[in-house]
Amino acid sequence: MTLSITYDQLPDLAGTDLGYTEYRTITQQQVNLFADATDDHQWIHVDPERAKQGPFGGPIAHGFLSLSLAVPFWTELLDVQGVSMKVNYGLDKVRFPAPVAVGSRIRMRAVVAEVTPIPGGYQIAVDQTIEIEGGSKPAVAARGIYRFYA
């Protein structure tokens, strides 16, 4: 469920658990397209037959593919009205604790850790965990840094 707030409400967001996104299924086509876009064609990602004999028992998504899905996941969780610009400012403490097998379903949970005033706006730090349905460890754990300008 998307939390919709106004720019003026941003300072009150610290500590807010934004909850979970919907699940998304990771497909081999997605993995192949990501491999083409990043020029990372390692067999554990793009060769399903060889990957069956590999350490994960089948092809897995690139860690950075899983991480990149934080962008569409993020838009499912928070909508800030009354801003002139939204900027994905960066990431802190990115980890990939568990591989995401092709065919797996993943979703993201987000908790706003900090809201800091910056010139012309606010910067928010968000603890983001991308989890695998039925998994015991997250696929991605990262702190996203976003900026919102008036």
Image (tube, rainbow, N blue to C red):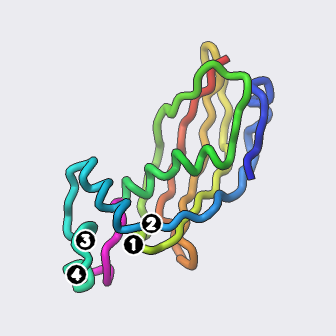
Quarter where residue 117 is shown: top right
Quadrant of the image containing the C terminus: top right
Task: Please give the residue where the numbered disc 4 appears in the rendered image.
Answer: 49
Marks 1 and 4, how far apart in space?
13 Å
Amino acid carrying label 4: it is Glu
Q: Amino acid at mark 1?
A: Val
In the picture of the structure, the residue carrying the numbered disc 2 is: 26
Q: Are marks 1 and 2 in contact (CB under 8 Å)?
A: yes
The residue that disc 1 covers is: 102
Q: Which one is in front in this view, the residue at disc 4 or the one at disc 3?
A: 4
Q: Is residue 72 above or below residue 104?
A: above
Q: Residue under label 3, please give it.
A: 44
Q: Earlier in the sequence, mark 1 or mark 4?
A: 4
SS majority, magenta: loop
Q: Position of residue 11 (x, y in %)?
A: 76, 29
User: Sequence order check: which comes first, mark 2 or mark 4?
Assistant: 2
Query: CA–CA distance between discs 3 and 1?
Result: 10 Å
User: In this rendering, would 5 be left or right of 77?
Assistant: right
